[in-house]
Amino acid sequence: MARKKIPPPEYVAPITVRSVIEELPEAEVRQALLSSGDSIAYQFLKSWENPKNKNKDLSLIARDCEFSISHFCKIWEHYNLQRGMMLMVGKVPKVMLDVAEDAQSKMENCPRCDGMGEIQHEKIEMRPDGEVKVSLTRVCPQCKGAKEIRVSGSRDARALMFETMKLTGQRGPLVAIQQNFGERLGQTVGTIEKMIGWGEKQ
């Protein structure tokens, strides 16, 4: 019995620096390389922008500069994480305002009487003069007829707000002004993550 022929595997083009970079916004790739502070990345960028290499394959330029795919991926990841952090930090004032508002007590419709101030209550009363008085409602015992009650703010929002403002006896501030940007950014991200985590529970 003849063996069944197995079709040859489809050709898969190798992943190169050129194939990776060509799939990304060129302006952002150049910015990532320029701002990386990496000497190899900077040398690759200079060679890439050199008019003499205009027609030279990008992968060959990368090889000449010993600029590997993994090296570029680390730079690209770091660049996008920094951009993402900055965008996220820009939303912090609005998020903190939301947390502060949720931490405040609010006046809401009384759940007992649905904001009507009275509840159904049938009562028949015989007066001394013989007149019969029939009452169908009475003042709501929860809101005392005010129709609203005071509801405390979110406990989670208050705890986060006090912790952020260093009012809970914590050892160190969540957001500290330090000369080390990485540490400051890490602390800021920690605060944001707590706010986001609190928001998801609501």
Image (cartoon, grey):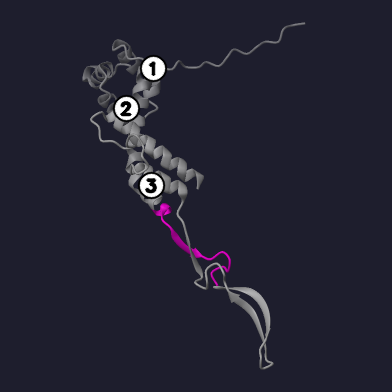
Residue closer to the observer: 91 or 45: 91
Indicate yes or no whether the magenta region holds residue 105: yes
Q: Secondary structure at mark 1?
A: helix
N-term-proximal mark, 1 vs 3: 1
Q: Position of residue 147 (x, y in %)?
A: 51, 70
Residue closer to the observer: 17 or 112: 112
Which amino acid type is marked by label 3?
Val
Q: Residue at x 36, y 37 (%)?
A: 170
N-term-proximal mark, 1 vs 2: 2
Q: Secondary structure at mark 3?
A: helix
Residue that label 3 marks: 95
Give the residue at the far bottom of this rendering.
129
Estimate the spatial distance between the alpha carbons at disc 1 and disc 3, rounded to whole Å. 36 Å
Quadrant in the rendering for residue 194: top left
Q: Is residue 142 left or right of residue 197?
A: right
Give the residue at the far right of this rendering.
1
Above/below status of 111 relative to 71: below
Whether residue 25 is visible here, answered yes or no, is: no
Q: Residue at x 52, y 71 (%)?
A: 144
* Mark in front: 1 vs 2: 1
Above/below status of 13 relative to 178: above
Which amino acid type is marked by label 1?
Ser
Residue that label 2 marks: 29
Query: Magenta span covers which residues?
Result: 101-116
Which disc is residue 109 wearing?
none
Which amino acid type is marked by label 2?
Val
Q: Position of residue 168 (x, y in %)?
A: 37, 42
Whether residue 196 is visible here, answered yes or no, is: yes
Q: How many marks?
A: 3
